[in-house]
Image (cartoon, rainbow, N blue to C red):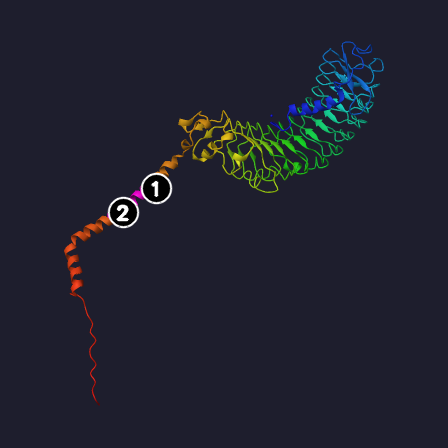
């Protein structure tokens, strides 16, 4: 799904086929060398015109020997090929081992995938100095000679996926100075040696998915300063290898799908200034995402937190400051599909301003806490349904009036307010009524008092006594 998944098989195949296109596709404006089958084309194989675009060489040939029952690769000292042979494609055969390739030094692309290869001779490819793409995937390899890739200075794409590797020698990839894409997924790797990728300074895409890794050496990837895509999905990490990730400031896409991680927190993701795509899918034990988990991912554009069947809580401060800092790019796409979320913190993100948000497949509690979501019309996709309360079960958000998103406490609170106001009004009315009754009962006395005031009765007057003057 990176990334629906950040680096899925589809992504790798797309990149892989882009390289194939550059090597093998003949432009529509060019005429083929010879539309007829060349006389030196091997039996049962197809020989197709191909243009060596990258090397700007002469027009050559793509030799395709797919699914023809081969058990060995022909000896090209004895078997003729149309020249120059830029491609040899032997996938879906029954080849069990590889010997040294000779007399095809112009080769750019070699595919021996989907065979039964369990052994390869040392330096088998050393006579292929122009090789740019090597596909050894989906065989039965459990080990490789440490000097296997010597003299492959121009190799850019290497696919080792779908084999039985448990260990890779420390200096295995050292000769591959031009290596750009490495796929070592779908193996049984438990540990990676420090220094394994130190010489691969041009490494751009690294797929280590579906192995048995529980940790990564802290400085494993510090030399890979332009590494942009890393797939760690389907391993056995119980925490995100954050210390190892901290040494990859160039990283743009990361997948940790399918790992047995239970909690994501502020220690999970270090400051990765260029990370734009993050995939957190299909984690069987993930329950909570705690505060400031994603706060250091300032460039994040897309995050996929989907299909985590035990995820019940995302802290309101999980994205704290990430969308508020002027130095951060705005998050645009969020996928929270098929989790076990019942509530969505309104202030965690500016949800209504995001480009796309997928909230379907969660057991939402449609109460007053989600009332705000009902007002974000562009987020109300088909299939976004309530689970609770009972009267709204299985109803689409878009079909429910805003006023129906209420809490049990709403009515109680309103009732308390009403009762308080009624009590105040009653007290005032009682006081006023009491005063009126009291005045009515004491009316004669009150009238006498008023009349007396007018006549001066009952009033006390003070008169200044005259001063008598006597002579002394």
Position of residue 213 measured from the top left corner of the image (x, y, whole percent): 65, 29
Question: Which quadrant of the rendered structure holds the C terminus?
Answer: bottom left
Q: Which residues are magenta?
A: 419-430
For the point 68% across and 33% down, the residue is: 228
User: Was residue 446 drawn as part of the magenta stretch in this picture?
Assistant: no
Q: Which mark is residue 417?
A: 1
Of the residues under marks 2 and 1, which one precedes in the sequence?
1
- Residue 281 in view, yes or no: yes
Judged left or right of residue 250, residue 362 is: left
Q: Between marks 2 and 1, how big is the CA–CA gap?
A: 15 Å
Position of residue 50 measured from the top left corner of the image (x, y, whole percent): 77, 18
User: Was residue 426 drawn as part of the magenta stretch in this picture?
Assistant: yes
User: What kind of element bears circle 1?
Assistant: helix
User: Residue 211 versus residue 226: which sits nearer the camera?
Assistant: 226
Q: Residue furthest bottom?
A: 472
Q: Which mark is residue 427?
A: 2
């Amino acid at each position: 799904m990176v990334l629906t998944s950040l680096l899925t098989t589809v992504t790798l195949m797309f990149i892989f086929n882009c390289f194939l296109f550059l090597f093998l596709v003949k432009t529509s404006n060019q005429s083929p060398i010879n539309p007829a089958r060349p006389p030196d084309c091997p039996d049962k194989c197809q020989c197709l015109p191909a243009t060596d675009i990258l090397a700007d060489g002469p027009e050559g040939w793509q030799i395709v020997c797919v699914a023809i029952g081969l058990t060995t690769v022909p000896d090209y000292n004895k078997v003729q090929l149309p020249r120059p042979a830029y491609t040899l494609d032997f996938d879906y055969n029954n080849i069990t081992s590889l010997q040294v390739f000779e007399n095809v030094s112009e080769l750019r692309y070699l595919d021996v995938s989907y065979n039964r290869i369990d052994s390869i001779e040392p330096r088998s490819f050393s006579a292929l100095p122009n090789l740019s793409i090597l596909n050894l995937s989906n065989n039965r390899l459990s080990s490789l000679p440490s000097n296997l890739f010597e003299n492959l200075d121009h190799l850019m794409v290497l696919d080792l996926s779908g084999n039985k590797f448990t260990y890779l020698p420390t200096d295995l990839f050292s000769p591959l100075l031009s290596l750009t894409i490495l796929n070592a997924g779908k193996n049984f790797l438990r540990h990676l040696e420090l220094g394994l990728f130190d010489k691969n300074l041009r490494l751009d895409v690294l797929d280590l998915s579906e192995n048995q890794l529980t940790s990564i050496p802290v400085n494993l990837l510090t030399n890979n300063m332009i590494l942009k895509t890393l797939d760690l999905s389907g391993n056995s990490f119980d925490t995100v290898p954050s210390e190892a990730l901290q040494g990859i400031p160039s990283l743009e896409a990361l997948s940790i799908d399918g790992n047995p991680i239970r909690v994501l927190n502020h220690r999970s993701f270090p400051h990765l200034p260029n990370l734009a795509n993050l995939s957190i899918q299909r984690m069987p034990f993930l329950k909570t995402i705690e505060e400031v988990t994603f706060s250091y991912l300032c460039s994040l554009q897309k995050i996929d937190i989907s299909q985590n069947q035990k995820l019940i809580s995302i802290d309101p401060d999980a994205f704290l400051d990430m969308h508020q800092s002027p130095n951060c790019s705005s998050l645009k796409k969020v996928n929270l599909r098929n989790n076990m979320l019942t509530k969505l913190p309104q202030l965690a993100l500016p949800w209504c301003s995001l480009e796309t948000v997928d909230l379907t497949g969660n057991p939402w509690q449609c109460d007053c806490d989600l009332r705000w979501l009902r007002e974000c019309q562009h987020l109300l996709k088909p299939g976004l349904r309530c689970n609770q309360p009972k009267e709204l079960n299985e109803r689409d958000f878009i079909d429910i009036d805003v006023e129906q998103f209420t809490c049990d406490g709403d009515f109680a609170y309103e009732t308390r307010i009403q009762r308080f106001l009624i009590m105040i009004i009653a007290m005032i009315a009682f006081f006023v009524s009491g005063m009126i009754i009291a005045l009515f009962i004491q009316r004669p006395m009150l009238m006498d008092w008023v009349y007396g005031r007018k006549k001066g009765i009952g009033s006390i007057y003070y008169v200044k006594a005259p001063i008598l003057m006597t002579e002394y």
